[in-house]
Amino acid sequence: MSSDINEIKSNRDETVSVGEKLGYEKDSKERMPWEHYLEAYRNADPKEIAERLQLPYDEIRKCLQLSFLGTAYEISWPDFQVTHQEDGRSCHPLEEMIYARILTIRFLLSGAAVKGSGKMKTYREMPWGEVYLRQFDGRCIKRLAFSYGNRLADFRAIMEHLQAVPVEHGDAAYELEIYPGYRIQMILWEGDEEFPPSSQILFSDNFPVSFQAEDMAVMGDVIIGSLKAFGKAIL
């Protein structure tokens, strides 16, 4: 992936998955890509990762330090063992969610530390905005609206637990940082008797430097799944 912001360039089968056809276990949808990226991570140079992403690296303990959704984690090399620094939060998705781990290992392998301009963009406005747009709309935009559009108090409680920053959009909106320098805004409009609830997700304009279309579709899914996990713990 390019490090210059100006040079930015499945669903499960209705009957049976490809993995099942090939005789893999039911978790193969997660296991196969995870094993692929873990092998690439083992072969990577952790000092190069730390320098490229401007992350602290403990060479003696062989641990990278990375913030994910506001929690500081240590990630060991070469085995990718994840531990959080105690922060009083109710759960820690990077230790518990396989898709969060896959997204993170991809970021470590090919991401870049590039600042955004301050502008926020919709998924459609990204260079590859039409790719996975329907999936993103269903898995992220509609899911966010369905989950919290009539539960704004719960949404606010979860976001405040995450120490997200309120922003002045919609009926409830917050900005949070998924990785250092990569910011996301989640916006809700409450439903009423005439109109259903609606939502929007905005991304800082540096996302295309480090993430591809499928990454960002997964990312929305991971964040909403994380909100659900936090909600179960605190509400």
Image (cartoon, rainbow, N blue to C red):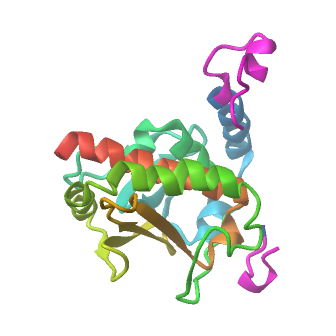
Q: Residue at x 42, y 37 (%)?
A: 96
In percent of width and height, residue 4 lies at 74, 82
Question: Residue 24, percent across and down?
Answer: 72, 14
Image quadrant holding the C terminus, namely: top left
Residue 5 magenta: yes
Q: In the image, 30: left or right of 118?
A: right
What is the number of callouts on the image? 0
Q: Is residue 89 left or right of residue 31?
A: left
In percent of the image, x 68 and y 45: which residue is there? 41
Q: Magenta stretch containing residue 232, yes or no? A: no
Which region is colored magenta? 2-29
Quadrant in the picture for residue 101: top right
From the viewer's perspective, tell me whether residue 9 is left or right of residue 46: right
Q: In the image shown, does 167 or 178 lie closer to the viewer?
A: 167
Residue 179 in view, yes or no: no
Query: Horizontal placement of 4 versus 101: left or right?
Result: right
Task: Please tell me which residue lies in front, 218 or 180.
Answer: 218
Task: Tell me where residue 140 appears, x and y as whole percent.
Answer: 52, 53
**Residue 88: x percent and y percent?**
19, 52
Q: For the point 67% across and 70% down, which residue is it? A: 124
In the picture shown, does residue 234 fall above or below 122? above
Outermost bottom residue: 117
Residue that lies at the very extreme toward the top in this rendered image: 23
* Furthest-front residue in this view: 194
* 111 vs 215: above or below: below
Image quarter in which the N terminus is found: bottom right
Q: Residue at x 24, y 63 (%)?
A: 156
* Residue 125 in view: yes
State the predominant SS element of the stretch in magenta.
loop
